[in-house]
């Protein structure tokens, strides 16, 4: 029997690329979207809102009823957010964490009982290289992904005895439509950060537009699924994106901060 893969946020971008790639490799793929009827893909789609616990339970139950199991859960659904910490509405910060952090945890909690019963399973959380460092005007996004990195470490130890593996995959910039769905704090006329934030918004969008092909993430995920003894942390991106994490480990805090400030022209 082929492995059953349940992937959140599979209607576009990285999630869609992963789902299509795994489908072509012979996996039984169930993707999710808030509006699955509007998505035209060769794999099965299920309605899911990761901020709604009832929706999560219904989606997981539907997959189990149809496939009889969930071998791999890929938590890919996520939401971008930009803005100076001072100017960004706190409610928008909470909403971002509800999607990127608490929503992921709720999906995991819904799937774990089935994986424990199977005595096997793999959970792959899509985080971000941005989660390894606090980036200016992306502090909330960095924080939500960084929190997920740490939760994954804890969860890995908690569920290992049940035969369940837990993995983080941190992508860098990929050419997707994430910028279109991102919450942008407005560039307020009276903001102390007006000019620098406006410049960095353009820089962030340029990074996404010139990003790598999402197929690289799909291939990385496939290799992880096929690995009998995967690592806990993976990074998928350009050399400098991955090297920036190494630099943070070895450089003094102020030196590393200066490098980031120079990069973002602050």
Image (cartoon, rainbow, N blue to C red):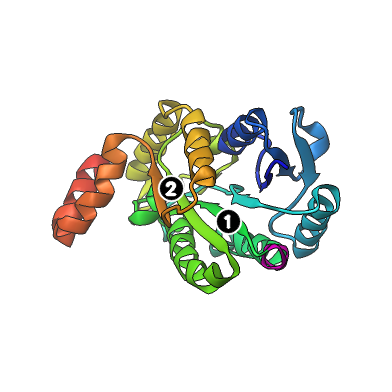
Q: Secondary structure at mark 2?
A: strand
Q: Is residue 148 visible?
A: yes
- Say whether disc 2 or disc 1 marks the residue closer to the N-terminus: 1
Q: Which residue is mark 2?
A: 170
**Mark 1 Cα-neighbour bin, 10 Å: few <14, some 14–19, many ≥20:** many
Q: Report how far apart the C-alphas of labels 2 and 1 lie in the structure.
A: 14 Å
Q: Which residues are magenta?
A: 112-118
User: Which quadrant of the rendered structure holds the N terminus?
Assistant: top right
Q: Which residue is mark 1?
A: 123
Up the image or down, 57 lies above or below 77; here it is: below
- Return the x and y of residue 218 as percentages of the image width and height: 53, 35
Prevalent SS, magenta region = helix
Count the labels in the image: 2
- Return the x and y of residue 214 as percentages of the image width and height: 50, 31
Q: Is residue 191 left or right of residue 24?
A: left
Q: Is residue 193 left or right of residue 56?
A: left
Q: Secondary structure at mark 1?
A: strand
């Amino acid at each position: 029997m082929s492995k059953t893969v349940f992937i959140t946020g599979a209607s576009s971008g990285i999630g869609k690329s992963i789902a299509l790639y795994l489908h072509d490799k012979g996996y039984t793929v169930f993707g999710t979207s808030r509006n699955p009827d509007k998505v035209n893909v060769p794999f099965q789609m299920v309605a899911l809102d990761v901020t709604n616990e009832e929706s999560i339970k219904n989606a997981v139950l539907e997959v189990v009823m149809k496939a009889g199991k969930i071998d791999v859960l890929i938590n890919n659904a996520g939401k971008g957010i930009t803005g100076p910490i001072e100017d960004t509405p706190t409610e928008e910060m909470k909403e971002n964490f509800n999607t990127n952090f608490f929503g992921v945890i709720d999906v995991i909690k819904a799937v774990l009982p089935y994986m424990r019963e199977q005595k096997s399973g793999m959970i792959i959380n899509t985080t971000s290289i941005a989660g390894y460092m606090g980036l200016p005007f992306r502090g909330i996004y960095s924080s939500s992904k960084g929190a997920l990195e740490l939760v994954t470490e804890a969860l890995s130890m908690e569920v290992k005895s049940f035969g369940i593996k837990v993995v983080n995959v941190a992508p860098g910039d990929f050419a997707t439509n994430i910028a279109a769905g991102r919450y942008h704090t407005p560039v307020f006329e009276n903001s102390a950060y007006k000019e620098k934030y406006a410049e960095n918004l353009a820089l962030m969008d340029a990074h996404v537009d010139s990003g790598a092909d999402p197929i690289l993430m799909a291939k990385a995920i496939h290799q992880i699924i096929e690995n009998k003894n995967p690592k806990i942390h993976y990074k998928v991106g350009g050399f400098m994106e991955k090297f920036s994490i190494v630099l943070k480990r070895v450089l003094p805090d102020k030196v590393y901060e200066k490098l980031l400030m120079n990069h973002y022209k602050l």
